[in-house]
Image (spheres, rainbow, N blue to C red):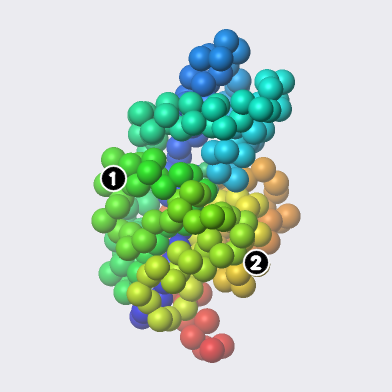
Amino acid sequence: MNAAIVFDLDGTLVDSLGDIVAAANRMLIDVGHDPASRDVIGRFVGNGLPKLVERLIRHCELPMDRHAELTQLTLTHYTAAASETTVPYPDIPEALAQLQQMGCVLGVCTNKPEMPARHVLDALDLSRYFDAVLGGDTLKTRKPDPIHLTASFDALSAKGSRLFVGDSEVDAETAERAQIPFLLFTEGYRKSPVVEIPHTVSYGAAAELPSLVSRMLLELEQTA
Ligand SMILES: O=C(O)COP(=O)(O)O
Ligand SMILES: [Mg+2]
């Protein structure tokens, strides 16, 4: 089986919200603003760090002409402490190892900037599973642009079927536009009900992934 599977990072492989919230709030405190709640900042995750900061500026009624400066400040805080509380979701390392044993080649396509994304994967001992990592600033474009996802697959040397695993509305839109079957993790950072997010299959625990994937790959081979 020479299939390629690309994973989203935040909310799919790792629960990283605590460190994202901490970095955003360090930036707010630096500029003399009160910190924002975890719920508020959580709603702003999904379209990359510049978008998160743009949404936070609007929410806190800060001047938008400071966007570039505040994005850089947040990135500096995040890069300095990206793996303080971040952990892989339960059974992720085991599921990734099993997928590799099945012959799948694995990659990451995240809107998180590439440097902290690689740092998080290294710190949590997950880098070894991935042959390619494309961050939100690796290309000139990012999810939901399907180019970000197709480039992530192209970076892997696998000729067989392609599957994308993610947790958000942004991931679902990306998969749909790239016409790649999509596995939706229901316990990440999605904002809408599962039924409203287009997906091929959904799952609630990483331990389900290897059997789900082999079933999907079998079906894809049969319809090819
Ligand atoms: O950084 C974000 O906004 C989301 O990152 P993700 O694409 O890994 O979910
Ligand atoms: Mg995500």
**Is 151 on the left-hand or right-hand side of 158?**
right
What residue lies at 32% left-to-right and 63% top-to-bottom? 131
Q: Does residue 166 appear to the left or right of 206 in the view shown?
A: right
Write down the residue under mark 1: 122
Q: Residue furthest front?
A: 65
Q: Are marks 1 and 2 in contact (CB under 8 Å)?
A: no
Vertical comparison of 32 with 137: above or below: above
Looking at marks 1 and 2 on the same chain, the residue that comes earlier in the sequence is marked by 1
Residue 38 in the image: above or below residue 6: above
Q: Residues within 10 Å of mark 1 (few under 14, many from 20)?
A: few
Q: Quadrant of residue 103?
A: bottom left
Residue at the image position 60 percent from the left and 13 percent from the top: 33
* Secondary-structure class at tag 1: helix
**Secondary structure type for disc 2:** helix
Q: CA distance from mark 1 to mark 2?
A: 30 Å
- x%, y% of residue 154? 44, 71
Q: Which label sits on residue 74? A: none
